[in-house]
Amino acid sequence: VVVYMFGCAFRAIAIRSDAHVLREEYFASVSESMWTLLTSVVFIGSPEHLFHELKESSSLGTVLFAFFFILTYAIMFILAGVIMEVISAVASTEKNKLFEAYLVQALREAQCPQTFWSTKTGFLNGLVAEPGKIMTHC
């Protein structure tokens, strides 16, 4: 959607511009404008050539090009941050599940009574019975 909007804007600028190169080579149609923006800015083909052509023909085109460039990379960095946050949340959840499974297994190996490790009250009563000591048995 963003590329389409900027493609339309650059096509309109190219029509009003005196630069023949902009109209025919880069922005001949809306789809050609979108392709130029994708290959030159998003995929980092060679944005400097397009930037210099826009700079020579239109100041509005230069401003829009710079805004599109910044907007494109801002969106990519935001998406990268979201992906990293999701990975962090999944890793934290998995770590907690593994710790819980380890704790249950350790309590079972200590051969504690079922009521000790299956209920909160039983567990807390076992901890209060010998505070500060390492539990080797229940």
Image (spheres, rainbow, N blue to C red):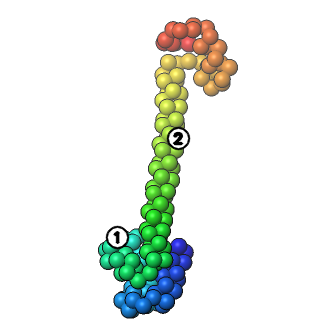
Please say if the residues under marks 2 and 1 sit with CB atoms less than 8 Å apart. no
Q: Measure the alpha-carbon separation of dots 2 and 1.
A: 37 Å
Residue 130: give x, y in percent of width and height.
57, 7
The residue labelled by disc 2 is: 93
**At label 2, which amino acid type do we have?**
Thr
Chain-order first, disc 2 or disc 1: 1
Of 46 and 116, which appears nearest the observer? 46
Residue 40 visible in the current orientation: no
Q: Total number of numbered labels?
A: 2
Secondary structure found at label 2:
helix
On screen, residue 42 versus residue 75, left or right, reads left
Percent x, y for residue 102?
48, 29
Q: Which residue is mark 1?
A: 44
Density class for disc 2 (Cα within 10 Å; few <14, some 14-19, many ≥20) is: few
Q: Nearer the viewer, residue 105 or 98?
A: 98
Task: Reply above or below: 116 against 69.
Answer: above
Residue 128 point in image, percent of width and height: 62, 10
Give the numbered dot on residue 53. none
Q: Is residue 134 above or below residue 94?
A: above
Type of amino acid at the residue the image marks with label 1: Ile
Q: Which quarter of the image is occupied by the N terminus? A: bottom right
